[in-house]
Every structure is written in structure tokens, then in C-alpha cells.
Image: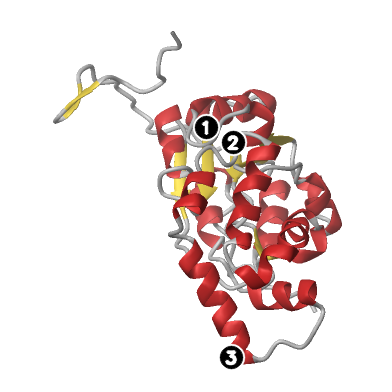
Amino acid sequence: MTRSPLPVCGPEGPLRATPSAQGPPPVRAVLFDFGGTLFQMRSYADRIRAVLRRPVGEREMDQLLNGLEKGLADPDVVEAQRGRDVSSHAHRHAFTTWYSSVRELAACADALYAQLQAPEHWVPYADTRSTLARLTDAGIALGVVSDVGWDLRATFAHHGLDRHFSSWVHSYAHETEKPDPVLFAHACRELGVDPAETLMVGDHPAKDGGAAGAGLRAYVLPAGAAPGAPRGLDAVLRLAGPAGVGRAPSAPRVEYDR
């Protein structure tokens, strides 16, 4: 049995204190989630119009989106989400089951899923590029840890961002999901850093914030940012603190893809 990197705690705190005169070690590596953290899919309305290949009015689109929202509570859809990210097959099944819960979209379910794997359908947030560049320039090692059903490297390469990363941990390749410590530990080993020197950044409190259970630090972004909008990744630069990344004289310039 692998021993947890965290101290055993009672209700009030650690049973055995670990004294540290200098505080936590500097951040030497940052791990990023993918969707909702560095990238976002183009809007569902745009995606649906692309696969239906016909004009779709606002009233009809609203009905289709309402159908997808209602489908999230469908028992078959809910069941399909269990273990969604532990294999490519499970991932595809989960999404196509959801799309098919809307009768008008059932015939397009495979096409909608194909969009997920198409790099051009993903949009980096406005501050993704500058944040990764500043971390790289500061010598911070970067990795991706994502619950996903396919290899993400083509998407990062399409947007010219793959060069920043030295570790790629895809849940389906390890047959498990975050917050399983196996995924975070694997990324740390590949980057040659200790978990205590590593920051995990994501948008899911349980999955990404769960990195703390593996001995990492974690920063969870609020949900809801629109594709191509600023994500608030400047906070990551401040959290990387000791390396000097977050002490720039002015805020990073936000660049929008045109």
C-alpha cells in the first residue's frame, strides 16, 4: 500500500506536526487541466449548426439547447457518465448518449463527438498563450493532466502551444480519473519534481482540487468563462511566486486570436 504524502490528521489537525522554518518550497512545476482551464469548445449553437448543415433559427436552437439541458438528467445519460474518462470507448459512449437524448440530434451524435477531437473546434482563452509563455520563460516545468478520451497533443500543436509542455497525462491512457493520485504522481515523475513543488490548475473542485490529496498545491478557477475570453490565469503567475513569475512590473498583455 502506497503511503500518502500528507500527514495523518485528526479533527483539529495533523497528529504529528512537520516543522518547516522556511515554509513551502518554491513552485517548480505547474500542471494544467485542459477544457475549461486553458481551452474552451466553440459554442453549442455553432457546433449544432455545423452538423445539421441547414439554417437553424433562434427559436429552434433554443429548443435544441433546452433538450440537451433536459438530457443531463435523463437516467440513461447519467448512467453513461459513470467512469466516462477511464477509456476512449466509455468517453465516446457518454457523449453520444447525451447528444442522442435529443431526437433531432440523434443522427448527428457521432459528428458532434468528432468535433470534440477536432483541434479547430477548441479555442484557447485570451490569457492562455501569454501565461504559458511567461511560465516557460521563468523555467517552470509544465504538464497537462486531463480527464479525457483522446490524445490532446494535436490540439495544443494546432494552436502552437505544445512546445510548452513536457508531460501529458490523459486519464483514458491510465484507465482512471482525477483525483486519483496516480495521475498527478505520474506527471510529477515525468517532470522530475516533488508533488510539494507542484501546482495543479483546473476548474473542477473535486477532481482538480483533489490534487491536494496527492500532496500538490491546487488552484481551482471559477466555472463559466466564454470561449476566447480572459480566464484569470494571471493568478497562476502570482502563485508561482518564488520563481519571480508573478512579480512583473505590469499585468501581462492579453492577446485575442483574430
Report the colour scheme: secondary structure
Q: Element under label 3?
A: helix
C-alpha gap between disc 1 and disc 3 = 51 Å
Crowdedness of circle 3 by 10 Å Cα count: few (<14), some, many (20+)? few
Residue closest to the eye, 248 or 84: 84
Q: Can you identify the residue that label 2 sits on?
A: 28
Q: Residue at the top extreme?
A: 1
* Disc 2 and disc 1 in contact, CB within 8 angstroms: yes
- The residue where tag 1 is placed is 197
Residue 180 on image: x %, y %? 49, 30
Q: Does residue 103 sit above or below 258 in this rendering?
A: above
Q: In front: mark 1 or mark 3?
A: 3
To which residue does mark 3 refer?
59
In this image, 76 relative to 119: left or right? Answer: left
Q: Local crowd at mark 2 within 10 Å, few (<14), some, or many (≥20)?
A: many
* Sequence-wise first label, 1 or 3: 3
* Residue 33 position in % (x across, y down): 59, 48
Whichever of callouts 2 and 1 sits on the residue coming sooner in the sequence is 2
Q: In the image, is 75 to the left or to the right of 53?
A: left
